Structure formats: structure tokens, C-alpha cells
Amino acid sequence: MFNRIRFGVVLILLSLGALCLPNRAEAKKLTVVTATTDLAALSQEVGGDKIQVESIAKGYQDPHFVEAKPSFLLKLRQADLLIVVGLQLEIGWLPPLINQSGNPRIQVGAAGYLDASQFAEILDIPTGTVTRAMGDVHPLGNPHYWLDPDNGRRIARGIAGKLGELDPPNNAHYQERFQDFDKRLMAAEQKWDAEMKLYWSRKVVTYHNSFPNFAKHFHLNVIGYVEPRPGIPPTPSHTIELIGLMKRENCKLILVEPYFDLKTPQSIARETGAVVVQYLPSVGGEKDVTDYFELFDYDIGLLIKAFQATQ
Ligand SMILES: [Zn+2]
């Protein structure tokens, strides 16, 4: 009797084990969690099937303000690598989650914590003393740096290096994938550069200051922002000033990130004859924009249409 019960228990345990254990290839995958979808997309490019990657923020959310959910903790607890944008972009929501995850692998300074800003060209780095008067959210430089394909390349190279460091047997795989990504990105950049060349030095206004790297790469001229300072909602006096500036400069395009209210941009557009375009700062901002290449294809398509409409 006792033996039969014991045999039964062993059988149940064995079958449970077979259900729970992933196959060998699955078990070896590195679990990567990124703060934003763009870092997840770049990780996927170089990691391929050797990693499992997920972003915490969705592509249509304001990455400065993400509502912390318990499910994020679970993801962070299981992560081998956490990749962040840095420059305090995530300061309002990520540090407590990292802390509460209790995962020593991804704590700041640990091998599994990667701040991608170290690889990128950073614009708007303040000189002198930083005060709140400069705005709320960009005290260390502009954190929206992924919107320059050259930075995408630099970040992907940095991620490939980190993946190889954490997973040495697959280092060659990550390096090969980076080389392939680099080639595809160079070809795409040639096409994008050629398409945008017709619109060099066009003037635009953006809602938030999240466009400087894109503007620098594609030679656009951002003359002002709907926000008076980064992270500060529009005020009537700033809006009046901006309308005056746009009229003087003959600026006909207002770009708005998908998470901002369109009311103020639309009222500015009515006064200035400009058009309002909702551009995507991140992969996943629209469901069809699923990778880094599609993000630029989408935004460049939008811009060209808008420039043509406002010749
Ligand atoms: Zn910002």
C-alpha cells in the first residue's frame, strides 16, 4: 500500500516536472527586460532567439510617467538583464520597482543593469547649475536619444556586447546579429536620408522636447515647444509667444507625441495655419510599428506628407 502511494506520488511529481520544465533551448534563453519598447526592439535585433525580451512601458505611453503595476515586479524578478534609457527618464517610476524586485542581478551597478545612454550621443546637456526653472524632466541632457538611427546603431552595439558578457557561449551569435543589423540599418538610413533631403531645414514645433536627435540627424529645425519647459504643461502666455514665433518664422508643422492632449496644439494650429501631426516617439506607438525600422518608416512617411501639404 505504502509503496503504491509512494510510486503514485513519484509519477505525479515526474509528470508535473515534465509540464513545468521548459525544453533545453528555452531554458538557456536570457531574460531581458527593458524600460521602453525601443530598447526591447534593439535588443531583439541583436539577441534573436537566444533572448526573451519584454518592455515595461508600452510604446504609446509617456515614458516619463508610467504607472507601476504588480506585474512589472514579476518581470523584474525573473530578469537576467534590465536595460534602461537613463538620464532620469524613468526616475519617477522605475527605481522603486528595481528595489522591490529583490533581484540582485539587475540592481544599479550589477552586471545585469545596463544604462543605454552611455552608448548614445546625448544632446541638450545642461551647462552650469541645473535648476527646476529649466523644467522637470531633462536635468542630465535629453533622454529621447533613440530617435537618431546612428544612436540606434550605437545602442545595439552596446547591448550586443552586454549580452555576450552575460552569455559568453553565444557571444558570436550576438556579434553576428549586430553586424547584420548594422548592414540593414545602413541601407535604411541611405533611403531615409535621401527621402528627407528635400526637406532639410524645415521648421517644426514639437509638444515635448523629444525630437532633437531626430531633428539633428535629418536636418530639421525645431524652433519651439508647446510645453513652456520639459514636463511643464502649456500656459496661456507661452502659447501666445509660441504663436507669435511660428508666425514670424513661418512654421507650419506641430508634432505631438501620442500621449498629449491635442487641444492646445489645435488652437495654435488655428491661429497659425499650421497642421498638427501625431508622430510616434517609440516602437509600438501604433500596432503596425513593431520594430526600429518601421518606427522611422512611419515617422518619415508622416513628415513628408505633412511637409508636402504645407509647401
Ligand atoms: Zn522628455
Image (spheres, rainbow, N blue to C red):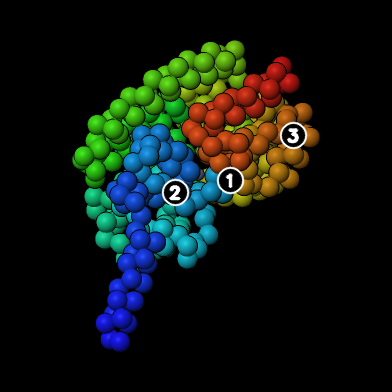
Which residue is drawn at the image coordinates 25% and 38% (left, top)?
A: 170
Which residue is drawn at the image coordinates 32% and 67% (left, top)?
A: 14
Q: CA distance from mark 3 to mark 1?
A: 23 Å
Residue 54, labelled with which disc? 2
* In the image, residue 93 above or below residue 118: below
- Provide residue 303's location: percent of width, then percent of height: 63, 25
The quadrant holding residue 118 is top left
Label 2 sits on a secondary structure element that is: strand
Mark 3 Cα shell of 10 Å, populated few (<14), some (14-19), many (≥20): some
The residue beneath circle 1 is: 60
Q: Mark 3 touching mark 1, by CB under 8 A?
A: no
Quadrant that contains the C terminus = top right
* In the image, residue 23 above or below residue 157: below
- Provide residue 34's location: percent of width, then percent of height: 41, 48
Which residue is drawn at the image coordinates 56% and 49% (left, top)?
A: 61
Sequence order check: which comes first, mark 3 or mark 2?
Answer: 2
